[in-house]
Amino acid sequence: MEDELLLMLPGPVPLPERVRAVMARQAINHRGAEFGNAYADIVRVLKGLFGTKNNPLVISGSGTAGMEAAVANFGKGRKMAHLINGKFGERMYTIGQRYASEARPIESDWGTPLNLESLKSALEDGCEVVTMVHNETSAGILNPAGEVGKICRKYDALFIMDGVTSIGGDQVLADDWGVDVAVVGSQKCLAAPAGLAAVSVSDRAWDRAVKNPPYYLDLPAYKKNAAKDPMETPYTPAVPLFLALREACLIIEEEGVDKRIARHHRMAGAVRKAVHAWGIDMFPKTDSLHQYSNTVTAACIPAGSNDKDFRGVVKKLGIQIAGGQDHLKDKIFRIGHMGAVSAPELLATLAATEYAVRKTGHQVLESGVMAAAEDLG
Amino acid sequence: MEDELLLMLPGPVPLPERVRAVMARQAINHRGAEFGNAYADIVRVLKGLFGTKNNPLVISGSGTAGMEAAVANFGKGRKMAHLINGKFGERMYTIGQRYASEARPIESDWGTPLNLESLKSALEDGCEVVTMVHNETSAGILNPAGEVGKICRKYDALFIMDGVTSIGGDQVLADDWGVDVAVVGSQKCLAAPAGLAAVSVSDRAWDRAVKNPPYYLDLPAYKKNAAKDPMETPYTPAVPLFLALREACLIIEEEGVDKRIARHHRMAGAVRKAVHAWGIDMFPKTDSLHQYSNTVTAACIPAGSNDKDFRGVVKKLGIQIAGGQDHLKDKIFRIGHMGAVSAPELLATLAATEYAVRKTGHQVLESGVMAAAEDLG
């Protein structure tokens, strides 16, 4: 049954039982100590994951709501530059077009390195706000946030980073990198259910907050309410999701941030070993600054097959992996390895995927499952 | 412990076990048949509760997000008139100020009848969009939606109705009343957890939708994705909340809409009987068009007491009722009787409240608890 599929997607991800169980409790008042304490726990853990001294603010909405909050509160009426090398970079540009006085796309092909020279030109031309997707899941590429942060600081531009699928799974050092606004979604590396976004904001960005952003995404209102004791949100929050995210954060704290990131790196390494063993191509093109994503791997579907057939074989074995989005449909498949998953889920996924690879008629070089097992063992 | 309080608030409300339990299940893909079927169930039931032929669209966000979606998609750049007789009417006006070319407040004192003559003048002056809160929980008053709808139609204005705390608990006939856009929140009369809003839109309103609303609240994008098979949302939805709302909707369907509304009326009637027996004043001032709310009752705290003391006595008995908001703090208390609650919760609440009334030194005329029991029995 579909509802029993193991989700190895770039979100949503399988949820630990503790995280799910806490949602089944009776409703609580969202303007009381218990809710405030849950919010405070979330903030304490997220600060470490964001790599910031600033308290992330939690919005009841998807990662997209967090992205829009960033653009609306800091980019409205300004010249914005949008680095694009995948679907979510494009989405940032689309949002920018609704707010910026001028939204400039700085496009590379999906999965290829960002064009940092064009970024510099845009900043020379007066762009004041830059957006970048840190981990571009549509293409499986990790973009160089530290490098982009340095360039933004040089030109005194604000730097908005979509960390939706990196924060909590890969290293993020928002303050050190010069990230002014960072955003994460709950249903990705944090292994919480979908429906919450968290946004951290630097002092420098607060000083430049615009007036009259959308009411529901008014970050100064979130800041004001988070400063209360007990902590609050400006509008009724999605209480079960806050309780679940708090539990997910406590699990992260118990595992330890460094260990968690190391686990994600280990899993990503093992998937790459498998892809290599199969003799098929990774999709993204990396360089000295760009790396393969450590939370999702994008590789090419062997010639002669298509998305439906390829992923259908994997699905019949009870596992859902992702296909390519938009023009990459039928060209790539993507395996999410973010959140709480570890060796068992990964080995099952690689076994099912290897079977699908073999069924296309592609001659694998060697067993990817064994290569991954050796790597993880 | 606070987390065990019986919440008799105008939302959040106690959740039936079935609604809570479904959130504890494993994550599912939000672009699949199971999610789509859940969304379809929600829409089928909500249509009946809204009294509309149009399919409500569900947003992952609070009722406020739904209100803003209404104003942003249909009021942006237009002259808006905002009927106000309580806190949520004020909020609509605040949101209107962020979007309208001119936002005109039509104010009455909280809990007093709306000024429909001023509304007509505003429409004569060219206001194109009107907002009204159907059930104003801050004051416990039910505003005359049918009457306002008639006036709006006469002037060909769009009518946006906040049904956040009426839909699912009191009669709403959006299409018959000429309501163009109606909004409900999940955590009120529907007895689902907080975090979702649903918005219905008339054909007339779709024809007048503005360009470039906020990206996250872009109702045409929700419409487009809801038309897919299986149904989808434009951005990742809060999946556990959709599953919970579906379960809440199935419970409503099992109870039957008419029976559910009759139950709310019966409970509201019993609370009013108790208030009358205590010899204290109801807060709102009704007239032939305005009625007491059937989902929350607002009454005056006896002279000499205050909010903290009064509600503290009730809380010590394990029950949380609401106080007055803003300038009504220390003046009124509010008992929510919406959602799944019935006689037992109500009798407990009235017993605790009567004890608090007596503790203020106020001489009750007779037992409110017995008056309510007789009414309910």
Image: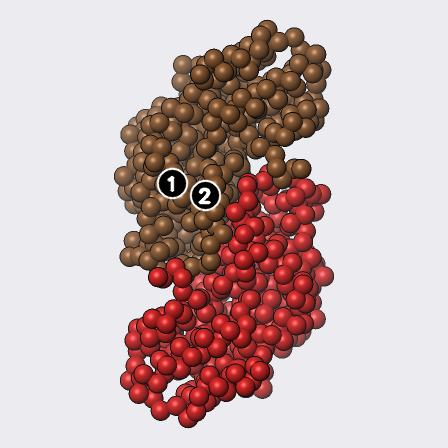
Chain colours: A red, B brown
In the displayed structure, B190 sits above or below B207; it is above
Locate residue A337 relative to residue B53 in the image: left or right. right
Task: Name the residue at 43% across, 91% down.
Answer: A366
For mark 2, what is the residue? B19
Q: Residue B274 — which label?
A: none
Chain letter of the residue carrying label 1: B
Same chain shared by disc 2 and disc 1: yes
| Residue B113 appears in the picture as rendered | no
Where disc 1 sits, the SS reads: helix
Task: Name the residue at 49% across, 57% down.
Answer: A194
Q: Give residue B164's position: percent from left, percent from top.
A: 45, 35
The quarter of the displayed image where residue A176 is located: bottom right
Please state, as top left, top right, bottom left or bottom right, where the N terminus of chain A lies in the image. Answer: bottom left
For the residues marked 2 and 1, what is the alpha-carbon distance in whole angstroms? 9 Å
Locate residue B30 relative to residue A71 in the image: left or right. left
**Disc 1 packing (10 Å; few <14; some 14–19; many ≥20):** many
Residue type marked 1: Cys
Task: Name the residue at 52% across, 36% down.
Answer: B14
For mark 1, what is the residue? B249
Residue nearest the observer in this picture, B367 or A228: B367
- Of badges 2 and 1, the one in the foreground is 2
In the displayed structure, A158 sits above or below B118; it is below
Task: Name the residue at 47% across, 13% down.
Answer: B374
Q: Give residue A363's position: percent from left, percent from top.
A: 35, 91
Mark 2 or mark 1: whose residue is earlier in sequence: 2
Q: Give residue B256's position: percent from left, percent from top.
A: 33, 32
Residue type marked 2: Val
